[in-house]
Image (cartoon, rainbow, N blue to C red):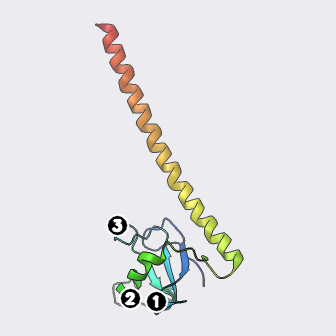
Amino acid sequence: MPLIWCTECGMRQVVRRISQKTWSLGRVFYLCTRYKCDGAGCPFWFWEEEYVDMLVGKRGNGDGQGSRSNVGRAIAQEDYYMKSEATIGVGHGVVNKEAEFVGLMKEAVVLMKAIFISSVCILFVMLLSLFVQLMK
């Protein structure tokens, strides 16, 4: 199954997970690595069948986002953090983890840039304050 870039946020590649719950043991689902259980993150989350339908262009509920299952989202609340393989194939797992790592590094660079800009602004204010004090 091809792993696409998230169609919701466009920032990360979708990952494949396998449910560890007894009532859905072994069932495959796909989600964005930015998915958050509380709804604050990316909403991309599909069972494998829904993901396939989305890939071939079928729409489950008419809104263009497939038919997401609330039960499936409940599974993801705990399964997202499980320690399972990203994919069954070893080669694909390395690629998926590498893509996830690249996405995390991009976020780290953005954060570092924001910290740098904030530091420069604080330094400028401090120098301006020192200059004003020296002029008195």
Residue at the spot of label 2: 67
Q: Quadrant of the C terminus?
A: top left
User: Tag on residue 108?
Assistant: none
* Tag 1 and tag 2, C-beta contact below 8 Å: yes
Asked whether the viewer can see residue 69, the reply is no
Image point (44%, 76%), residue name: 78
Contact, mark 1 vs mark 3 (Cβ under 8 Å)? no
Q: Which residue is mark 3?
A: 40
Earlier sequence position, callout 1 versus callout 2: 1
Location of residue 62 with respect to 100 vertically, above or below: below
Secondary-structure class at tag 1: helix
Determine crowd level at label 1: few under 14, some 14-19, many 20+ residues with C-alpha closer than 10 A: many
Asked if one can make out residue 112 in the rendered structure from this viewpoint, the answer is: yes
Q: Residues within 10 Å of mark 2 (few under 14, many from 20)?
A: some
Residue shown at 67% from the left, 70% from the top: 94
Q: Secondary structure at mark 3?
A: loop
Residue 118's quadrant in the figure? top left
Residue 11 image offset from top left, x and y in percent:
49, 64
Give, as a three-letter code, the residue at label 1: Glu
Estimate the spatial distance between the alpha carbons at disc 3 and disc 2, rounded to whole Å: 20 Å
Q: Which mark is residue 50?
A: 1
Quarter residue 96 falls in? bottom right
Mark 3 near mark 2, Cβ–Cβ under 8 Å? no
Up-down relation of residue 130 to residue 60 (above or below) = above
Q: Earlier in the sequence, mark 1 or mark 3?
A: 3
Whole-percent x, y for residue 41 in the image: 39, 67
Q: Residue drawn at (50%, 80%), measured in percent from left and top?
A: 30
Between the C-alphas of marks 1 and 3, the distance is 22 Å
| Chain-order first, disc 3 or disc 2 | 3
